[in-house]
C-alpha cells in the first residue's frame, strides 16, 4: 500500500512570494488533513477535508492560506504572500474516515521563508 | 479547547534500559482517544500506540506500553529494552470521538545512548 505522498520535500522562498504544496493521500482515504509544524513544536491543524468538503478550517489564516481538494483525492495548500513566520514543515495526513483511529502522515514539506 | 502538555523537552536512555515519557492533557469530554507518535529525524510520523479512554486496561504494543490515568488526565509512554532505533521525537496526541483532528503536545526528543 502506497503511503501519503507530498511534494516538494523542500522549498525556499523569499517573503511576499507565493508557494504551493501538493498532497496525495492513501487511496480510498476520505479524510485529509494539513498540519503546520513549527520547529520545536507539535503539529497544529490548518484544515481538514472530508472528501472534497471542508470540515474544519478554524486555524487556517485565510488572508494568506488557501487549500482545495477538488475531486476528493489529492489536495493543494497555497500560501500567498508568505511571511517569515510561515517557515515550518507542512504535514499532510489522511485517514479512512473522519473518526478513524489512525492518521497516516506524509513525509512533509519543509518551507523556509527568507 | 483541549490541550496536551509534554513537560520533558528532552530525555535520554541507555540502550537496553527503560524510559518513561510523560504527557498530561486537559479536556471536558468523557470519551476520547490518546496516541503516542514517533517522528524520527527527517522521517515520517508514525503511530506507536493508542488508548481509548473508555478502556481501563493500559495499551501495550511489544516494547511500548502506556500508563493511562483518566482521573489525573495523565498518559505516559514506557519504552522497555530501548534500542538505538527508538531515538526520535515522540508526540503525545489527543482526539475527541467526534472530531477528526488531533491535538498534539510539543514533543519529547529521546536520545538512546549505546
Image (tube, rainbow, N blue to C red):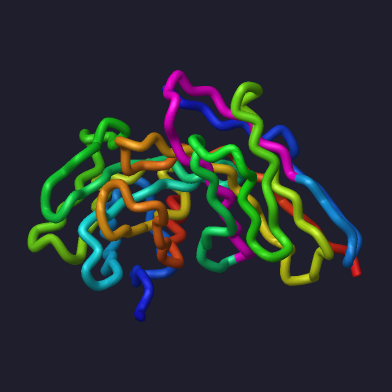
Residue at the farthest left position: A71
The magenta-colored residue range is B21-41
Residue at the farthest bottom position: A1
Residue drawn at (27%, 43%) of the image: A47
Q: Is residue A72 left or right of residue A77?
A: left
* Foreground of the two, A68 or A112: A68
- The image position of residue A104, as x and y in percent, is 40, 62
- The image position of residue A60, as x and y in percent, is 28, 37
* Foreground of the two, A76 or B108: B108
- The image position of residue A92, as x and y in percent, is 36, 58
A28 in relation to B103, above or below: below
Q: Is residue A68 left or right of residue B85?
A: left
Residue drawn at (20%, 40%) of the image: A55
Residue B61, by quadrant, is: bottom right
Residue drawn at (31%, 51%) of the image: A33
- The image position of residue A45, as x and y in percent, is 37, 41
Amino acid at each position: 500500500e502506497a503511503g501519503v505522498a507530498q511534494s516538494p520535500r523542500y522549498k525556499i522562498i523569499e517573503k511576499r512570494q507565493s508557494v504551493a504544496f501538493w498532497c496525495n493521500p492513501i487511496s480510498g482515504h476520505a479524510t485529509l488533513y494539513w498540519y503546520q509544524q513549527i520547529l520545536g513544536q507539535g503539529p497544529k491543524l490548518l484544515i481538514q477535508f472530508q472528501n472534497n468538503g471542508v470540515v474544519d478550517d478554524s486555524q487556517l489564516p485565510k488572508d494568506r492560506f488557501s487549500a482545495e481538494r477538488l475531486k476528493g483525492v489529492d489536495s493543494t495548500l497555497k500560501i500567498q504572500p508568505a511571511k517569515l513566520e510561515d517557515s515550518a514543515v507542512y504535514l499532510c495526513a489522511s485517514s479512512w474516515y473522519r473518526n478513524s483511529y489512525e492518521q497516516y502522515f506524509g513525509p512533509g514539506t519543509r518551507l523556509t521563508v527568507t | 479547547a483541549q490541550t496536551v502538555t509534554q513537560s520533558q523537552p528532552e530525555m535520554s536512555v541507555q540502550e537496553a534500559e527503560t524510559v518513561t515519557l510523560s504527557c498530561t492533557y486537559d479536556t471536558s469530554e468523557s470519551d476520547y482517544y490518546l496516541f503516542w507518535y514517533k517522528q524520527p529525524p527527517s522521517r515520517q510520523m508514525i503511530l506507536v500506540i493508542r488508548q481509548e479512554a473508555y478502556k481501563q486496561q493500559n495499551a501495550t504494543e511489544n516494547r511500548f506500553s502506556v500508563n493511562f490515568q483518566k482521573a489525573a488526565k495523565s498518559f505516559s509512554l514506557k519504552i522497555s529494552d530501548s534500542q538505538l532505533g527508538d531515538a526520535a521525537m515522540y508526540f503525545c496526541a489527543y482526539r475527541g470521538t467526534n472530531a477528526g483532528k488531533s491535538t498534539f503536545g510539543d514533543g519529547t526528543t529521546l536520545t538512546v545512548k549505546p
